[in-house]
Amino acid sequence: MPFGLDGVEVGLIIVFLCLFGGIMSGFPVAFAIAGAGVISFGIIAALDSAGLLLHAAIDTSSAEYAQLIAEGVRRDAISVFRYPELPRVEEALFPQGWEQAVDRNLAFIVNRMNERVIAGASIETLLAVLMFVMMGITLERSKIANDLLTTMARVFGPLPGGLAVSIVIVGAFLAASTGIVGATVVTMGLLALPTMLRNNYSPELATGVIAASGTLGQIIPPSIVIVLLGTLAGDIYSTAQESRAQLVGCSDALTYLGEPAVVSVGTLFQAALLPGILLALLYGAYAFGFALLNPAKAPPVNLDSGNGSVISKDDALIWFLLVPGAIILGGIGLAMVDVIGTQSVSVSSFSQAGEQASLRTNVSEACQAAMIELHGQAAWDLAVAQQAAINEAGGVQLARELTAEELESARSVAVLGAAPIGTGVAVLFLGLGLVLAVARGINPIADGKPLAIGAAGIGLAFLIDWLLIAANTSSGTTFVLMAVPLGITMVGIWPAFARLAQNELLAVVFPPLVLIVAVLGSILGGITNPTPAAALGAGGAIMLAAYRKLKDENKTGSMILLASLALVVMLLFGVNFDLRMGLETTTTADVIASVIAQLAYHAAFIGLLYACWVLFRTGVLGPVVRETAKVTSMVFTILIGSQLLNLVLISFGGEHYIQDFLRSFDNELKVFLIVMLVLFILGFVLDFLEIIYIVIPIVGPVIYGGTFDPKWVTIMIAVNLQTSFLTPPFGFALFYLRGVAPKEVTTGHIYRGVIPFVLIQVAGLALLWSFPSIVTIVPNLLP
């Protein structure tokens, strides 16, 4: 063999050279990957047929190999890396010919495509990619970035490095609302870069902060990277942990781990929240520190101020800090003393099943030893004691249907234990109180009587809920009683919204902020999974963009506002009434609520159709749909092409060869560090999509098959992949920025400007490595 390389090693080199060659050729990446797989397989098959590729495999008929098997070493744990002294035998790369290799693996790869691309369980989650892409492109076309950049520059411009800090804030905001790196970088490059250069900002700082902030969409949810990575990681983690459990002698991963081997995209969104905010803070801190050390290269800038009343420091302190803080802390305090809480009296018609032991104890001796090594002797002893107590009590108590008396008793206990004020009422009216407080601070000299009336309505709502509404009060009665204080509160809310609309910052930030809260809140709060949330985001983005277009045409946009109100009505009635018809317990109030909800649904649907017509008429919808189809098609074509390339690696054993090499290291941290370094280096030449679909399936069974938390592993990979957009010479963010930068900004300026932010990325990875709780704390706190 050339240079003493094994045939499998030569095959791996051929595959990756063909891959890099295809990508560098300028041919569309989605097709270059599949083409690289076909071409590399043809070259390897031709060399193997000519007898030029030989693989030095372990001689399974040798006495040394038989001795290892007799000592209890599993066959799949024996490799040339872990036992290099074992006798070898040379064999062809395709012992039975390449035709047999194709026939053996073709069915496997077709099944994998069917599972991951066409009709598998992950397809519903992958649909979120399409709708998140549409949401991002729609918001980008609605000129939201233009408004945000202008407003943030006015707010932060007078500070040292204020324009750079405002870029970071806008980048984080756009990441949470659009998540499209290319659109964000291009938009900020067109709008902000000329302004920064005119105000004597360093070209390096200006280009670096724009490129880096534009990539925050890769990690701050809703992130397309996390959706794609999460669907892949979930399958790999589950399979890897099952193999790990069987390797140590346990029947399944649930027995060995004591919990299901599952990781979802929604959980990964929760895990990515703090790391994304951390990176944004590091970017902003660097920009501010650079300005302090180099004031001439990042000077303060006073831009034209927008319209709005002058607010004194005392008014700002009272109405923007003290009063909202008192409202929030007051609500938390009342919840802690159980004044605010759930008022649900719903009880199960079945009894609670008895608790099982924390770990399964009816396992083999090998599995028992492995579980003790994993969980500790104390955890095992506790599980044994729990199981002994369960056995003495006659086994695990099964759930049974409750009698009528038991049901009534359970409902009585629920009524007595209910909080005086319901959580839904408290959240709604405390939120309205925050609106009133901020509106008062926006224009302190305006008439405060309407706001005072609104505040009185909030107090009345809490009083009525405490005195007149019990936990077993019907939804219809509750709705009628709360309509009065809600109507009084609206006397102050309408002028409050009018005042808020006069403030430029709130007028720009509030609409997309509501959309972000609706999408992310539903995911992070465990209310729904990413796909329905993405649908909500796409529909909301269409309505928001249409409203913006109507305002540009000096039209009211009242139909869009009514459709938005209809969505709120649907939410309120869906939460407070049972809208299922045909039940024995259906009440008149539920029937009325169902009719109102149906009317609200049709009003919202008509409003969405009208918004689509507005965007179509103004020439926005067509480009949005085409761009969405283009990006989504590229993602799925890369997914299909990567499966073909993986087929080539599997056909001659390249995938297992790499995995055996990684498993040969005894230190799990060392293995993961090697993988992270490889991903970082590959980021210089490959896009994140190629890395996710080509590299992760190869190394995933190793890094997800150990003791590391899968959430931490996935977010570490996601942050690492984010650097692939920044690392010269092929970082996509650099190309996007180069395409829109003025002529005086050179490629050297861009490369030098982005290097500090690449180092910040590395520092962020080091922080996440040292403090994994940054990733895990939010999923542990949220449902």
Image (cartoon, rainbow, N blue to C red):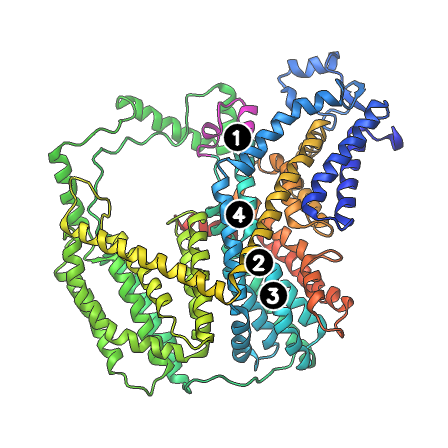
Q: Nearer the viewer, mark 4 or mark 1?
A: 4
For disc 3, the neighbor class at 10 Å (few under 14, some 14 to 19, many from 20) is many
614 and 582: which is toward the camera: 614
Q: Amino acid at mark 3?
A: Tyr
In the rendered image, the vertical position of residue 80 relative to residue 769, given as above or below: above
* Gap between marks 1 and 2 measured at Cα: 45 Å
Name which of mark 3 and mark 1 comes first in the sequence.
3
- Residue 227's label in the rendered image is 4
Q: Position of residue 646 (x, y in %)?
A: 67, 34
Residue designated by label 1 = 373
598 and 16: which is toward the camera: 598
Q: SS class of the residue under badge 4?
A: helix
698 and 497: which is toward the camera: 497
Q: Position of residue 339 (x, y in %)?
A: 22, 59
In the rendered image, the vertical position of residue 543 relative to residue 665, given as above or below: below
Q: Position of residue 40 (x, y in %)?
A: 77, 35
Q: Residue at point 45% right, 21% down?
A: 363
Q: Is residue 370 left or right of residue 735?
A: left
Which range of residues does the magenta coloring cover?
242-260
Q: SS class of the residue under badge 1?
A: helix
Residue furthest out toward the front = 617
* Gap between marks 3 and 1 measured at Cα: 42 Å
Residue designated by label 3 = 283
Asked whether the residues under the numbered discs 4 and 1 touch, taking CB atoms below 8 Å apart as contact, a structural biologist would say: no
For disc 2, the neighbor class at 10 Å (few under 14, some 14 to 19, many from 20) is many
782 and 235: which is toward the camera: 235
* Gap between marks 2 and 3 measured at Cα: 19 Å
Classify residue 693 by image quadrant.
top right
Residue designated by label 2 = 180
